[in-house]
Amino acid sequence: MKKLSTLMLSLLLVFALVLTGCGSKDTSGTASTDTGKKKIKIGVSVATSQEAVYKFMEQAMRDNIDKDGVELEWVSANNDANKQMGDVENLIAKKVDVIILHAVNTGTAKNIVKKADAAKIPVVAMDRLPDNSKVTAYVTADSFKVGQTQAEFILKQLNNKGNVVILEGEAGNSVAKQITDGNKDMLSKQPDVKIIADQPHQGWARDKALATIENLIAKGEKIDAVLANNSGMAMGAVQALKAKGLIDKVSVIGSDADKDASTSIMHNELRADIDKKPYDLGLGAYKIAVATAKGEKWQDTVTGLGTASTTDNGEAGKVDVLLTPIKLITKDNVKDMEQRWGKLE
């Protein structure tokens, strides 16, 4: 009996050691998983997703998240500055590594950047630069050049003489201002060109731009050309002019080259538009955000996507900028846009 008891005790000790060994292996496996590569979390807050160009910006990011190990959260503020503040507060609460911000209102977005800064979360400004804000980088098509290119085209159409209307985007928006400044830089050099109206439009809205042109026509103003800060407002102008039988007499140009605008160019109604290449713009913002999250110098990661530069941003001083390319779209090359939109009819 004594020998049997000793044998049973020995067996119990062996069994306990086996269990302990198994437990050690399980713990080791869990630790290995826990120390696996952590995903980068990027939050994107855009003013709106209603216009198709923003869907291409989003697609550029989503095309790369798997290979880069990125978790992406995309939220739209529906052109509501208060909602955008709430959206960003939620992204901060989720402890994202970087925020890409496409501001509803660049004049008030400084408060959003301050919130992120207080949480030690870098902000990459996309397409719109929050005023007086020290962001990590600002990614945009060269808006001043967009305005200049629009005006150059219109001046050729008018032979440097005529009455011009400028349809601006949201009041206080930096992109709207830069495009309009580019317009005026070129138009002001021609003494026989008169700007008869220069008006901002809340939400960059097509219906509000349509109403502006309708009101000018109703007042008996002679309009020779319309320069719109975006495609939507340009199409509002086209709609108003078509209704009055004036579309053949007025040259209209927009910016964004969305599908409606591209189709209108095919039909020789809208005369031209500027393609701001939204996929490239979104990809540039994304690559900078990833590099920032990794602690890398972003200028080394965006080769071929644009030109690195700086801009003065008021109280914030100099801000690093990536300028992405633009392209003038006319009837001569509008078929190129079918690669993006499909057949234009």
Image (tube, rainbow, N blue to C red):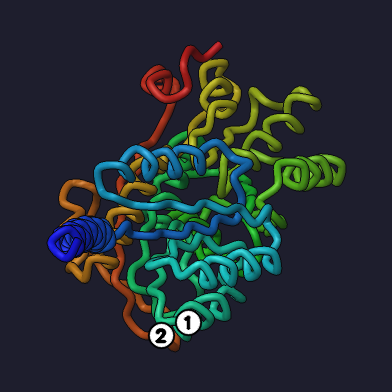
Q: Circle 2: is it few (<14), some (14-19), or many (20+) Cα within 10 Å? A: few
Q: Which mark is residue 316?
A: 2
Which quadrant would residue 172 be assigned to in this image?
A: bottom right
Instruction: Report the front residue among 21 and 74.
Output: 21
Q: Would you place residue 219 above or below residue 290 in this image?
A: above
Q: Position of residue 133 (x, y in %)?
A: 45, 80
Q: Position of residue 61 (x, y in %)?
A: 37, 45
Q: Secondary structure beneath disc 2? A: helix
Looking at marks 2 and 1 on the same chain, the residue that comes earlier in the sequence is marked by: 1
Q: Are marks 2 and 1 in contact (CB under 8 Å)?
A: yes
Which quadrant would residue 56 be assigned to in this image?
A: top left
Q: Tell me which residue sits at (36%, 85%) in the image.
A: 317
Which quadrant would residue 65 be assigned to in this image?
A: top left
Q: Would you place residue 83 above or below residue 217 in this image?
A: below
Q: Secondary structure beneath disc 1? A: loop
Q: Position of residue 181 (x, y in %)?
A: 48, 62
Instruction: Report the front residue among 171 and 161.
Output: 171
The residue where tag 1 is placed is 132
Amino acid type for the residue under numbered disc 1: Asn
Q: Is 240 displayed left or right of 269 in the figure?
A: right
Q: Tell me which residue sits at (37%, 48%) in the image.
A: 281
Rendered-image quadrant of the C terminus = top right
Q: Is residue 36 visible?
A: no
Amino acid type for the residue under numbered disc 2: Ala
- Residue farthest right in this picture: 218
